[in-house]
C-alpha cells in the first residue's frame, strides 16, 4: 500500500463511519438433539458457552490491533425447531431462555436461530415454535427469530404466512411497553440463506460446518464520500467508483474476519458485502441514492439508482474475496437509516415504493413501523407480496414489520441502539382477509423446474 491508500483508509475510519458491523460465530447444535428437553437445554448451553467463550475478547483484540471498530459480536445457531419435538410450548420457551442465558454468559449482542424452515410445510415442532415466538421474544433480551415461508423451488406456504401475521401482532402486544420492539427481532423470509451473519434473520444452516466465523461489513458513508467526487459523471463511472469502493471495504472485512477466525482456531466462512446503515448522520444508504441524483429517496428514479448500487457493490465485493456469501448488496431498513427516516417523515417514500425497491436490492421490507391496529391479515398479505417477489425473481426477500401498539400515522416508534427509530408509515386501508384465508400453498413458479 502507498501513502495515499493508507491515508484514504484512515479517513474512511475517522470521518466516513467505516466499521465491521458484525463478527458472527456460527455453531451447529445438531449434536444437542435429545428426547429429553432438559438434556437438550443443558447441551445447548454448554456447547454455546464453550464455542463462544473467547469470541468477544478475540474480536476486540483484532479490532484494536487494526484500529477498525467491530460494532457487534453475535452468535447464530441451527434452527431451533430441528432440535426439539416436544408437545409442550413451555419447552420451546425454555430453550429460547437457554439461548438468551448462554448469549449473555459470553457477552454477545445477539443470538439468532430461534427459527423454522416451513417453505413447503410444517413439522409439529415448526408449528409449536412459531406459536411460541411472541412469548420467546418478549421473555428474552437478545434472542432473534426467523421463519422461511417460501422458496423458488417450493412456492409459498400460505398457511405459514397467515399464521405469522397473527404471530407478529401477538409479539407487538406482548412488547407494547417498548414500542413493540419484539417485532424488530423477527424476520419472515423467502429464499433464506444459510450463512447470513446479520440479525435478526440469521440462522446457521444444516449444510454448514461445526463452527465458523462470518463477517458483515458496513460502509455507506465511504461509498457516498467516493461518489461526491463523481458529481455529474455518467453512470458507467458511478458504477466504477462504487465497485472500487466496495472492493476496499470487502478486503478490510475479510482481513478482520480471517484474523478473528485464526485467533479462535475455527474456519473462516464468508464475508457479507451488504451496506448496512445506521441512524447516525453520514451512515445512510438513502444518502448514497440521493448522491447518485434523486432529490429525495423514494422519488422517481430511486429504484433504478438502487439497482445500480446493489449490482456495483456485488461486482466490487466478489472481485475482492472468494468467500462472499450471506445477503450481500444494500440494505434499506427505515428505522436504521437516517435518510430513510427523513424520507418517511416528509412523505417522499411509502410502503409501496419500498416494496418496489426490494425487487432490486438485497433483502426486503425492513424495520418498518406501521399502525398498531393494522389487521393481522394485512400483515400476512404484505408478507405474501414480498415472498412472491423473492420466489418469482429467485432472490432472498424478507419482512420485518413493527405494528407499534397504540401508535398511528404521525407518531414515532423508538427502538434504540442500531435499531434506531421510525415514523409510523401508512398501509393500504383495504382488506386482504379473503385472500389470506384461502390457505394452502402457492405452487412454485414454472422456472423453478431446472435440474
Image (cartoon, rainbow, N blue to C red):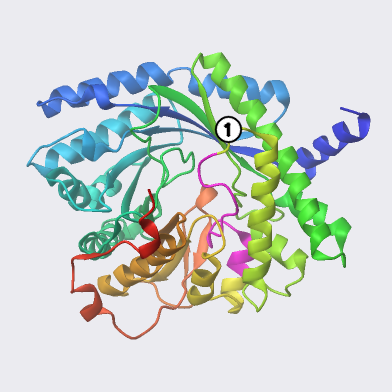
Residue at the image position 50 percent from the left and 42 percent from the top = 326
Q: Position of residue 222 (x, y in %)?
A: 75, 48
Position above or below: 7 against 213: below
Residue 284 appears anywhere in the view: no
Please provide the residue range marked out in magenta.
325-342
Quarter holding residue 449: bottom left
Label 1 crowd bin: few (<14), some (14–19), many (20+), radius 10 Å: some
Please tell me whether residue 268 belongs to the stretch shown in magenta: no
Answer left or right for 99 relative to 356. Answer: left
Give coordinates of residue 349: x percent, y percent: 57, 75
Q: Nearer the viewer, residue 252 or 57?
A: 252
The quarter of the rendered structure image containing the N terminus is top right
Please name the residue shown 12% across and 46% down the image: 124
**Image quarter of residue 189:** bottom left
* Camera-side residue of 261 and 372: 261
**388 horizontally vs 301: left or right:** left
Asked if the magenta segment contains residue 332, the reply would be yes
Residue at left 72%, top 27%? Answer: 67
Residue 238 at x, y = what percent?
80, 59
Extreme-bottom residue of the structure: 430
As drawn, is 148 to the left or to the right of 67? left
- Front residue of 237/57: it is 237
What is the magenta segment's predominant secondary structure? loop
What residue would you read off at disc 1? 323
Residue that extends furthest to the left in the rendered view of this protein: 87
- Residue 80, given in percent of the width and then of the height, sits at 26, 37
Q: Give the secondary structure at mark 1.
A: loop
Question: Where is 192 relative to 367, above or below?
Answer: above
Amino acid at each position: 500500500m502507498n501513502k495515499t491508500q493508507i491515508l484514504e483508509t484512515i479517513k474512511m475510519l475517522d470521518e466516513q463511519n467505516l466499521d465491521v458491523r458484525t463478527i458472527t460465530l456460527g455453531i451447529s447444535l445438531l449434536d444437542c438433539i435429545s428426547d429429553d428437553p432438559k438434556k437438550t437445554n443443558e447441551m445447548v448451553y454448554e456447547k454455546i458457552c464453550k464455542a463462544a467463550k473467547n469470541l468477544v475478547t478475540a474480536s476486540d483484540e483484532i479490532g484494536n490491533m487494526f484500529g477498525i471498530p467491530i460494532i457487534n459480536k453475535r452468535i447464530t445457531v441451527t434452527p431451533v425447531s430441528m432440535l426439539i419435538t416436544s408437545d409442550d410450548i413451555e419447552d420451546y420457551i425454555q430453550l429460547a431462555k437457554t439461548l438468551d442465558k448462554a448469549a449473555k454468559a459470553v457477552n454477545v449482542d445477539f443470538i439468532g436461530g430461534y427459527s423454522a424452515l416451513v417453505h413447503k410445510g410444517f413439522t409439529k415442532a415448526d408449528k409449536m415454535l412459531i406459536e411460541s415466538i411472541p412469548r420467546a421474544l418478549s421473555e428474552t433480551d437478545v434472542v432473534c427469530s426467523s421463519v422461511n415461508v417460501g422458496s423458488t423451488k417450493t412456492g409459498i406456504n400460505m398457511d405459514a404466512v397467515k399464521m405469522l401475521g397473527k404471530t407478529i401482532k401477538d409479539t407487538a402486544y406482548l412488547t407494547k411497553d417498548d414500542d413493540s420492539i419484539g417485532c424488530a427481532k423477527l424476520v419472515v423470509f423467502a429464499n433464506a440463506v444459510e450463512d447470513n451473519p446479520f440479525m435478526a434473520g440469521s440462522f446457521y444452516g444444516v449444510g454448514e460446518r461445526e463452527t465458523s466465523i462470518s463477517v458483515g461489513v458496513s460502509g455507506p458513508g465511504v461509498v457516498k464520500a467516493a461518489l461526491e467526487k463523481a458529481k455529474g459523471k455518467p453512470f458507467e463511472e458511478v458504477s466504477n467508483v462504487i465497485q472500487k469502493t466496495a472492493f476496499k471495504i470487502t478486503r478490510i472485512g475479510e482481513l478482520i474476519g480471517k484474523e478473528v477466525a485464526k485467533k479462535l482456531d475455527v474456519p473462516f466462512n464468508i464475508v457479507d458485502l451488504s451496506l448496512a446503515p445506521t441512524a447516525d448522520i453520514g451512515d445512510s444508504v438513502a444518502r448514497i441514492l440521493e448522491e447518485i441524483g434523486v432529490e429525495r429517496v423514494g422519488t422517481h428514479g430511486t429504484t433504478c439508482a438502487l439497482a445500480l448500487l446493489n449490482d456495483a457493490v456485488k461486482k466490487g465485493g466478489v472481485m475482492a474475496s472468494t468467500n462472499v456469501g450471506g445477503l450481500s448488496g444494500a440494505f434499506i431498513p427505515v428505522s436504521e437509516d437516517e435518510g430513510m427516516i427523513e424520507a418517511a417523515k416528509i412523505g417522499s417514500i411509502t410502503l409501496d415504493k419500498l416494496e418496489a425497491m426490494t425487487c432490486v436490492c438485497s433483502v426486503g421490507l425492513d424495520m418498518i413501523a406501521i399502525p398498531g391496529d393494522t389487521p393481522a391479515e394485512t400483515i400476512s398479505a404484505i408478507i405474501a407480496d414480498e415472498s412472491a417477489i423473492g420466489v418469482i425473481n429467485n432472490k432472498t426477500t424478507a419482512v420485518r414489520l413493527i405494528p407499534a401498539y397504540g401508535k398511528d400515522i404521525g407518531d414515532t416508534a423508538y427502538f434504540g441502539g442500531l435499531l434506531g427509530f421510525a415514523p409510523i408509515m401508512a398501509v393500504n386501508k383495504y382488506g386482504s382477509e379473503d385472500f389470506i384465508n384461502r390457505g394452502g400453498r402457492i405452487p412454485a413458479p414454472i422456472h423453478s423446474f431446472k435440474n
